[in-house]
Image (cartoon, grey):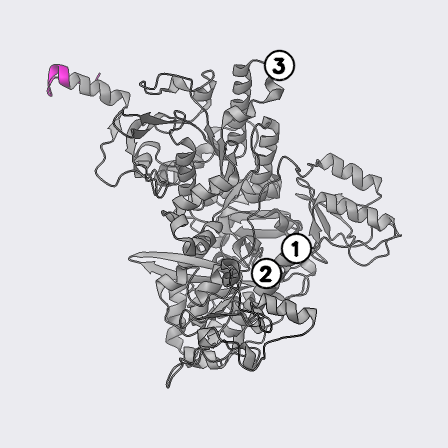
């Protein structure tokens, strides 16, 4: 259990390092010694001090091939683009050469390879931070270079010594889907195998298979129950050994134990293990460079730093208890991730502040990469007897809660965007969990979603409001944090309620009108004027003529929201995921990457950071398979927007025995129920009926019965008015808006180079079609401006 973890020991810091500025910090950086052959000379020459291998062992020849060095008497072959990406480049210029092997380690120290360091120049230290964009951002700062905004945000900035080689998680393919398992089947299997267990809130608790007991002996009920099996997915985690895997992995290990073989924890790929190892090394280097805030010699600098992050009221004792440090060269707070097994450092999160005018933005960077960073900040401080917990979405909020109320508090690694199921075992010991994720409506919706994972009966929610801001703001404003926690609302309620239970929610929607409207589109401002925003729990029907660009438009429509943090799941049944990703990447970069291949890695790295996932379906699929996949994605990745392209591909052979209209109504009803039950927005593309090209499409033009338009909250139609003299004009029409009734139409301009439908920046006339305004306009025309009266 989490309570059995020891508090991580203090890592030896550089208390006297870096107090004289960046130059002294760089000189004090202790990194492995680099031999003479680790310096790459200009002009592509062979490294000094290491003769070229002519006749040697197979290992030597293999090393020569890896480093691109030819054998004796052989001409040097041309280096390919992939090999060039794996080589090392001097930050001072365009010189390339084989990457020294020592650079693959945690770091190296030496002068500039080109010999450009002249008199008075700062000695340069290169620390290859991989993987992730945090490395490319922090590297120039640790090297003593100027902190330019452009260099810090660009993944291809000079000093980047490696590329990430990992693929985005994809959902199970229809060819080999992961078999689903129910909680009943899990219980029956455990009983049949004589494995003792008991029910938890979101997991089943059982003795671990990986603690070193003999395989030929049955598991004892007196052994610590450190193995947790997820009730929804069947995946398991052993908190004692950190072994984890799927339900099929668990069954395989049980069979091995019955045969007398010691169970072996499922191993990750070598590529993933190397990335995690490198991330730990990079994190250790940064952690040793960072200093506690209270150890800065300049008291003025300490106060300014605390004021910058809004933690002036947070005491040094609180910062010390949670192990928070400050990296002066990057002007970032450093939050550690300690392993719950042996208290070793596994990763870091860095938080810095960016000011743009009067707006303050907090930027987070993690090691390892964001989707592999699973740190419940504050977990080593949780005791075995703690039964109440406050779950926050920010590390600074956890500090404020602990100081103001003295309660056990943890911060989720990804804030209000996601609660990874792998963290649920560490929350099983708590009988009551209060979710206080933020101060906006988006955090409130996320808290209700997370409460379902954690079990509604033990969760309480703090409703955002003026008198109930986020914990850090409450501390700074001197509010009674304990009183706010006591006023938290229970997450569970009866099926029938009165207005008394709804009163506060109604008031919250009236106060937060803009937040209730949803997430705004950045590329389609005219769409914001009509729909007001993208809201959870709604069903949007989208249609348009064949060949008008429905998939291209809806991909940019969804990409716009995804870039603002909306976790998106794409189900493309018409085109494969490679073509779809290519379209979205072109729209994301707003340029033709075919003509600028040297920029591909830079834009691909940025695109990879988006919370975007794809179903691997193609062609006809059953609605049950699609709904099950969507349910899995909502649980695992907290998906809030699902795009289905298109409905006709789910009316397959299993519906041949029934009427096609009835089949479509059933599918639309299933999506409507899923959107409501899971508070998830679904965008469903439906082809229109075959009509004359000269006629504009209407709501009645949607294929099938009227159920699709009746169930939908929004109906969008892509109008394509073709001209005989050239390409036609395209418009987006909002023909239904259940939120506030505003409907209308506005033009779109398509850019073939960027595949973008972003509306024109010129003045656009937005036609309102509300019934009251049309009636009023007609009366003005008929009777004059002074003759109209309200009916």
Check disc 2 and report its element: helix, strand or loop.
helix
Task: Kindly report the distance in space between the C-alpha atoms of the residues bearing marks 3 and 1.
Answer: 46 Å
Residue of label 2:
275
Q: Is residue 681 visible?
A: yes
N-terminal of the pair, mark 2 or mark 1, is 1
Residue of label 1:
269
Expressed as whole percent of the image width and height from the top left, the position of residue 207 reads 78, 51
Check disc 3 and report its element: helix, strand or loop.
loop
Expressed as whole percent of the image width and height from the top left, the position of residue 760 reads 27, 39
Q: Which residues are magenta?
A: 781-791
Disc 2 packing (10 Å; few <14; some 14–19; many ≥20): many
Residue 426 is a magenta residue: no
The quarter of the displayed image where residue 694 is located = top left
Expressed as whole percent of the image width and height from the top left, the position of residue 119 reads 37, 86
Disc 1 packing (10 Å; few <14; some 14–19; many ≥20): few
Q: Which secondary structure type mostly characterizes the magenta part of the structure? A: loop
Expressed as whole percent of the image width and height from the top left, the position of residue 462 reads 49, 45
Judge left or right: residue 408 versus residue 697. Answer: right
Q: Which mark is residue 657?
A: 3
Q: Which mark is residue 700?
A: none
N-terminal of the pair, mark 2 or mark 3, is 2
Q: Nearer the viewer, residue 364 or 173?
A: 173
Q: Nearer the viewer, residue 583 or 61?
A: 61
Residue 512 vertical placement versus 222 (above, below): above
Residue drawn 50% across the image and 61% down it = 85
Residue drawn 46% across the image and 28% down it = 685
Residue 293 vertical placement versus 223 (above, below): below
Task: Kindly report the distance in space between the C-alpha atoms of the residues bearing marks 2 and 1.
Answer: 10 Å
Q: Are marks 2 and 3 in contact (CB under 8 Å)?
A: no
Check disc 1 and report its element: helix, strand or loop.
loop
N-terminal of the pair, mark 3 or mark 1, is 1
């Amino acid at each position: 259990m989490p309570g059995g973890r020891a508090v991580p020991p203090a890592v030896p810091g550089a208390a006297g390092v870096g107090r004289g500025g960046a130059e002294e910090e760089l000189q004090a950086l202790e990194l492995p010694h680099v031999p003479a052959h680790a310096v790459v000379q200009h002009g592509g020459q062979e490294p000094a001090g290491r003769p070229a291998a002519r006749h040697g062992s197979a290992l030597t020849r293999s090393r020569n091939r890896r480093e691109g060095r030819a054998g004796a008497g052989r001409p040097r072959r041309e280096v390919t683009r992939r090999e060039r990406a794996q080589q090392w480049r001097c930050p001072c210029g365009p010189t390339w050469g084989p990457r020294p092997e020592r650079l693959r380690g945690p770091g190296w120290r030496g002068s500039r390879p080109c010999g450009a360091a002249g008199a008075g120049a700062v000695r340069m230290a290169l620390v290859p931070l991989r993987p992730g964009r945090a490395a490319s951002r922090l590297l120039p700062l640790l090297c003593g270079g100027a902190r330019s905004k452009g260099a810090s945000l660009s993944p291809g900035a000079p000093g980047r010594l490696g590329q990430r080689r990992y693929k985005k998680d994809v959902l199970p393919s229809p060819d080999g889907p992961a078999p689903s398992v129910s909680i009943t089947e899990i219980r029956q299997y455990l009983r049949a195998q004589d494995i003792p267990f008991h029910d938890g809130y979101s997991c089943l608790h059982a003795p671990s298979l990986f603690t070193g007991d003999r395989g030929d002996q049955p598991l004892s009920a007196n052994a610590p129950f450190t193995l947790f099996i997820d009730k929804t997915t069947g995946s398991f985690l052993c908190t004692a050994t950190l072994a984890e895997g799927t339900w099929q992995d668990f069954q395989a290990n049980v069979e091995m134990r019955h045969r007398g073989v010691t169970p072996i924890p499922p191993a990750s790929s070598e590529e993933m293990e190397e990335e995690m190892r490198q991330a730990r090394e990079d994190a250790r280097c940064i952690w040793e460079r960072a200093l506690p805030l209270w150890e800065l010699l300049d008291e003025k600098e300490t106060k300014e730093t605390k004021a910058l992050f809004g933690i002036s009221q947070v005491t040094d004792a609180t910062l010390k208890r949670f192990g928070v440090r400050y990296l002066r060269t990057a002007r970032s707070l450093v939050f550690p991730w300690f392993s719950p097994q042996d208290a070793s450092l596994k990763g870091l999160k860095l938080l810095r502040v960016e000011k743009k005018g009067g707006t303050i933005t907090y930027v987070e960077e993690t090691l390892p990469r964001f989707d592999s960073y699973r740190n419940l900040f504050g977990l080593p401080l949780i005791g075995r007897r703690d039964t109440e917990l406050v779950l926050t979405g920010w590390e600074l909020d956890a500090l404020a809660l602990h100081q103001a109320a003295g309660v056990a508090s943890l911060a989720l690694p990804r804030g209000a965007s996601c609660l990874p199921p792998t963290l649920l075992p560490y929350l099983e010991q708590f009988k009551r969990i209060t979710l206080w994720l933020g101060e906006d409506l988006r955090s409130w919706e996320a808290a209700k979603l997370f409460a379902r994972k954690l079990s509604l009966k033990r969760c309480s929610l703090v409703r955002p409001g003026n008198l109930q801001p986020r914990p850090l703001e409450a501390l700074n404003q001197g509010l009674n944090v304990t009183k706010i926690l006591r006023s938290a609302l229970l997450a569970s309620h009866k099926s029938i309620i009165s207005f008394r239970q709804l009163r506060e929610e109604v008031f919250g929607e009236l106060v937060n009108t803009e937040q209730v409207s949803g997430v705004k589109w950045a590329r389609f401002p005219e769409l914001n004027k009509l729909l007001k925003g993208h809201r959870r729990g709604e069903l949007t029907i989208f249609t348009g003529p064949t060949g008008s660009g429905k998939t291209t438009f809806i991909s940019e429509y969804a990409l716009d929201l995804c870039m603002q943090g909306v976790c998106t799941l794409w189900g493309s049944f018409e085109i494969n995921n490679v073509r779809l990703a290519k379209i979205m990447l072109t729209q994301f970069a707003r340029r033709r990457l075919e003509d600028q291949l040297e920029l591909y890695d830079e834009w691909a790295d940025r695109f990879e950071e988006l919370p975007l996932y794809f179903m691997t379906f193609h062609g006809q699929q059953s609605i049950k398979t699609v709904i099950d996949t969507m349910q899995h994605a909502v649980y695992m990745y907290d998906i809030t927007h699902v795009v289905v392209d298109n409905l006709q591909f789910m009316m397959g052979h299993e519906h041949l025995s029934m009427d096609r209209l009835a089949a479509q109504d059933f599918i639309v009803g299933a999506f409507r129920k899923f959107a409501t039950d899971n508070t998830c927005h679904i965008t469903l593309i439906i082809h229109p009926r075959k009509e004359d090209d000269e006629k504009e499409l209407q709501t009645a033009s949607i294929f099938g019965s009227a159920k699709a338009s009746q169930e939908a909250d929004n109906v969008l139609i892509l109008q394509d008015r073709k001209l005989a003299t050239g390409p036609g004009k395209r418009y987006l029409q909002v023909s239904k808006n259940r939120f506030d009734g505003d409907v209308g139409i506005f033009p779109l301009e398509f850019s073939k180079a960027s595949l973008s439908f972003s509306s024109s920046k010129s003045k656009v006339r937005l036609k309102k079609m509300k019934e009251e305004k049309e009636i009023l306009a007609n009366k003005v025309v008929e009777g004059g401006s002074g003759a109209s009266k309200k009916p």
